[in-house]
Amino acid sequence: MKKFIFILILVIFSKFIFSQKIIIPTGKYSEVKQFLKSNTYLVSKSDFSGFAITMTNILKDFWTITPIKIISIKEFEKLKNDDKNSFLMIDEVYFDADKSKTKFDFLILTLGGNYKTIDDMPTLCAIPLCYADDESENYCYKLGLMLEFIQNHINICKNDPDINSDKILSIYKNKIKNLNTKTLYIIKDDISNELRNNSQFEKYYKYNFKFATTEEIEKLIANKDEKAVIMHRISNYGKKELSYSITILIDTKNADIYYYDIVKVSKSDKTLLQANDLENFCKGY
């Protein structure tokens, strides 16, 4: 499945860094309609991973758009050629122009069918989870929100026959104007040391915020809190080699994206969220 993601997402997401343009896949309108009639299968590499255990516990509460069942990779191979099936899975992505081929794990939604190769299967949505070599799976408490985002994404696409990545990006970017009506809940481990107190943080972030634990954020997601926005931050913490950071602000009510940015990071001490990042949140795009 690595090749699948490399081929499908490689060209799309390579533009994140080098053209400064974020492109989120939508699939064709006909493919979205096909998905809505499908049975969805969540592909798990291991029954004992944090991903599989969390998904087993939350699927019934967070996935409502289609019937869904967890399957193994072996079962995926048997089901992938049926156009009545769709699949949620984790796979690896790297940026096309990145010589280091730094890999990320993305949660993607794709369609089955009589395609010549797995590479040809259409991708309807994709959202980054972590660096591919990060075995901590510390994103698991946010998986319910990731599922909500994918379904929200599909619901936007199904109502527009002319939907494409540019149009849906405009919809997401327009949400930033509502950030001042929300409270940003942020985990201190994701931000630079000098910002880890209220007085310093509020120098650069002008809206409501609160330092929170993962447990508190998990509750906000479960309760679909209408006033909360959380940060999903991916960075190569503690490593000295060139890396990338991905920052997404997403609300816990509808899984609307308010901010999405990917940047190169050349020093390990810059992998944590910085003051200029907070200023960018407030300025918008």
Image (cartoon, rainbow, N blue to C red):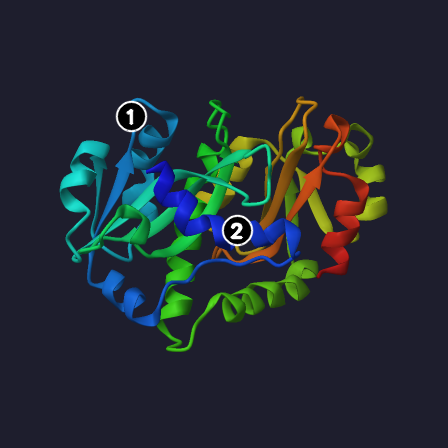
Q: For numbered disc 1, what is the local secondary structure?
A: loop
Q: Which of these two is toward me, 160 or 152?
A: 160
**Above/below status of 174 relative to 212:** below
Residue 222, percent across and down?
43, 44
Instruction: Quadrant for the C terminus, please.
Output: bottom right
Residue 192, percent across and down?
76, 31
Mark 1 or mark 2: whose residue is earlier in sequence: 2
- Residue bearing mark 1: 46
Can residue 228 be spotted in the picture? no
Q: For numbered disc 2, what is the local secondary structure?
A: helix
Q: Say what amino acid the circle numbered 2 marks.
A: Phe
Q: Say what amino acid the circle numbered 1 marks.
A: Ser
> Residue drawn at (37%, 31%), measured in percent from left and top?
51
Closer to the eye: label 1 or 2: 2
* Left or right: residue 206 compared with residue 187: right
Instruction: Quadrant for the N terminus, please.
Output: top left
Residue 266, percent across and down?
74, 33
Can residue 79 be spotted in the picture? yes
Q: Tag 2: Cα neighbours inside 10 Å, few (<14), some, or many (≥20)?
A: many
